[in-house]
Image (cartoon, grey):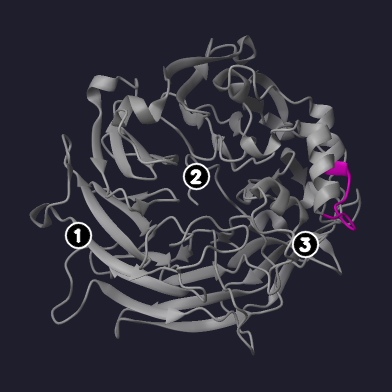
Amino acid sequence: MDLRGKPISFGGPVNIITLASTDPDFMWAVGSDRVAYVNKKNGKWEEVARFEALEDASGGTLPSIAGESFKKFGESSAVGMDVDEMDQFLTDLLGPQYGDRFGNGFYSVVDNVNVLYTHFGANLYGFALADPDDPSSGITARYVLEDVITAIEGPDIPPGTRLFGLSMTYDGHLIVTFSNGIAVIDRDLDESSVIFYRFADYEYVSNSIAVDEEGGLYIASATVIPPMSGIMRRLIWTGSEISDKGEDGAWQCGYEASSVLPPMIKVGYGTGSTPTLMGFGDDEDRLVIITDGAEQMNLLAFWRDEIPSGGERIAGQIPVTCGFEELPEWIQSEQSVVVSGYGAFVVNNLPETVDPDLPGKNKVLQVSLMGPAYPTSYGVERFEWDPENDRWSSVWARPDVSSTSMVPVHSQSAGMALVNGYTPKNGWEITGLDWNTGDTVHQTIFGDINFGNGAYAILQYLKGDELLFNTFSGPIRVHYDTGGSGGCAAGFSPLAALLFVPLFFMKR
């Protein structure tokens, strides 16, 4: 599939997710530089409004980037480049401070009145259409909480404190996750409404949270002083406070973390996973799932509610091997565990060998090079939770499948796990793996051009054979031609089996 010339909303260099609007004819496109409103009616993909949010938040020190620059990067290839060459290429296209663009707009949520909440620079924004009846009238920052960390926490904050997640309570409050705590605030971003729960200064959170219908807030941190360890928490939003009391249903439990930072792609010492909930029926095991921070990670399940008699908070754990005959130094994921029913799917984002030029470089540079220019990462594994015996088992593993940095997804209708990776044979591709057997049942092959690099984003599909691919250069909409013409090829047909609704929030 040639992605050149396909409809795209330029932006980036990271475009985590394209979110649903309350109007089904439109979607919100959020990248690390801008917010856009895109018309998707009748197969279109046309940007009708745009707000240069990073330029606004930075006071112009990180100016907007012309779409032509993103196009030039997407149509080029990183094959044969080294660190210095790619650094210069990105500098020429995105400016000398291009590494500072990473991390903006990563976490976002759209509410039921079509307000998009996300973060750029030091600010938390609530974006809305200037005229809901005329989207082309533009996007306005309806709510802005400037210097959000200080506004919520005050001046006494640990060095390096960052915003790491946004979500929503079931009673309609915004949840803001920081590296050192969690806050609940009214959706008009009124500072007087803030409830803040602070963690110890030696803890660090590097992912977002999961939320349940009972006010449970699931968040994982890791210590940043020896001996390194992790803490998994369930806090409770009572409607008026954030409680850590056991009588309210709160708990915390330790998990393993590494004393060494991963050399690339992954962030932090502890888990790379935003917690994922498993089990929702009254008669089901209700669990919360993460991968831990061990250099060769384990898959962990914690009891969400009461611990069964004689048990412990960690319901079960199992090593992730990805089927390697000889385990590499690192098996680690920067992605959420993908869950369907009692099944869980994990990916390894660390290459077996890391070139000494890459560690310590900014994430934009690393994610541009891993695969086409430096060794790619391999390894995925599917697990199943046994509710009768309260334990994990490995269903299948594929040490030959690449998943570099994109968040994988599960297709319930097609019974597949889907990943984005790079191999020397095919270049960038989307690989679909049968959920029950691990067999490769779908491939969308992009080749070597950078448009095929999902760069920390999440895979998405729409109704009607539509791929929405959140590339380094912006989300691209592609219609699969299963008849074999038009430069598109599919590994199985019909692709209408791939049915995903647009997501209202992003989870990493």
Label 2 and label 1: CA atoms lie apart by 25 Å
Residue 82 sits in which quadrant? Answer: bottom right
Q: Residue 9 location in percent, x, y? A: 72, 31
Q: Which residue is mark 2?
A: 506
Q: Residue at x 34, y 20 (%)?
A: 188
Above or below, 161 relative to 66? below
Above or below, 302 relative to 211? below
**Disc number placed over residue 87 in the picture, else none:** none
Q: Secondary structure at mark 3?
A: loop
Q: Which residue is mark 1?
A: 251
- Direction left: furthest residue: 247
Above or below, 491 relative to 214? below
Label 1 and label 3: CA atoms lie apart by 41 Å
Residue 81 part of the magenta-drawn span = yes
Q: Which residues are magenta?
A: 74-82
Label 2 and label 3: CA atoms lie apart by 25 Å
Q: Which residue is mark 3?
A: 371
